[in-house]
Image (spheres, rainbow, N blue to C red):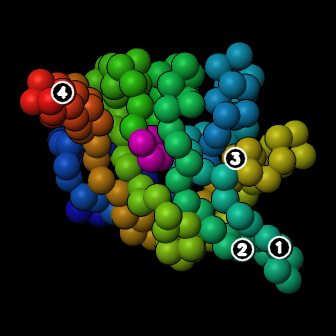
Amino acid sequence: MIMTTPISEEVIRSLHVGQVVEVSGSVFTGRDSVHRHLYDGGKCPVDMRGSAIYHCGPVVVKENGVWVVKAAGPTTSIREEPYQADVIRMLGLRGVIGKGGMGKQTLEACREHGCVYMHAIGGAAQVLADVVTEVKDVYFLEKFGSPEAIWHFAVERFPVVITMDTHGNSLHSDVEGDSQKKLQELIAGI
């Protein structure tokens, strides 16, 4: 399935854990500094409603006066757990892209506000950079530095897997539960 931003709440609520989708349109990077800034009441310089925030510190260089993305792999998302639910609500996000999953607060915000967590492929930074067709703008570059800035990317068929949905399902919780069960079985067999 290909989803183009802005994504409607109806489309997001039709998605389920395990689905593979491709995102096209606008995606905005945001890491620790951006999340903390927004959580603390700072203003967002761009309208992200209906789009996705990508936990990514991309490698971006200027070539002949144009920003070019060289690497755009996901960073670990759980660091944003203290802030993500509020950021989803404040910005009207329909997606969060990262790796490793998030916790119960984010899962509840996804259910309440119509958002999904999308897992991007770790270790594929250069492959994912290839789906960035344009750097439309950059915000907070001087304030936070390149990896922590908000980069506004146009993407074409960015591949992700839905791992937290609006129905309260979390592949990350399922895997953790299964792992704990198997560990207990192994310990009992010793």
- The answer to whether the residue labelled 4 contacts the one labelled 3, judged by CB atoms less than 8 Å apart, is no
x, y percentage for residue 31? 64, 40
Q: Earlier in the sequence, mark 1 or mark 2?
A: 1
- The answer to whether the residue labelled 1 contacts the one labelled 2, judged by CB atoms less than 8 Å apart, is yes
Q: Which residue is mark 3?
A: 150
Q: Which residue is mark 1?
A: 62
Q: Residue visible at 26% across and 32% down?
A: 176
10 Å neighbourhood of mark 3: few (<14), some, or many (≥20)?
Answer: many
x, y percentage for residue 119? 38, 49
Image position of 27 (left or right of 175): right
- The answer to whether the residue labelled 2 contacts the one labelled 4, judged by CB atoms less than 8 Å apart, is no
Read off the magenta span.
96-100
Q: CA distance from mark 1 to mark 2?
A: 6 Å
| Magenta highlight: main SS | strand
Foreground mark, 2 or 4?
4
Q: Which residue is mark 2?
A: 68
Q: On the image, which quarter does residue 158 sit in? A: bottom left
Q: Earlier in the sequence, mark 4 or mark 3?
A: 3
Q: Earlier in the sequence, mark 2 or mark 4?
A: 2
Comparing 37 with 99, the one in front is 99
Comparing 176 with 138, the one in front is 176
x, y percentage for residue 148? 73, 44
Q: Which residue is mark 4?
A: 187
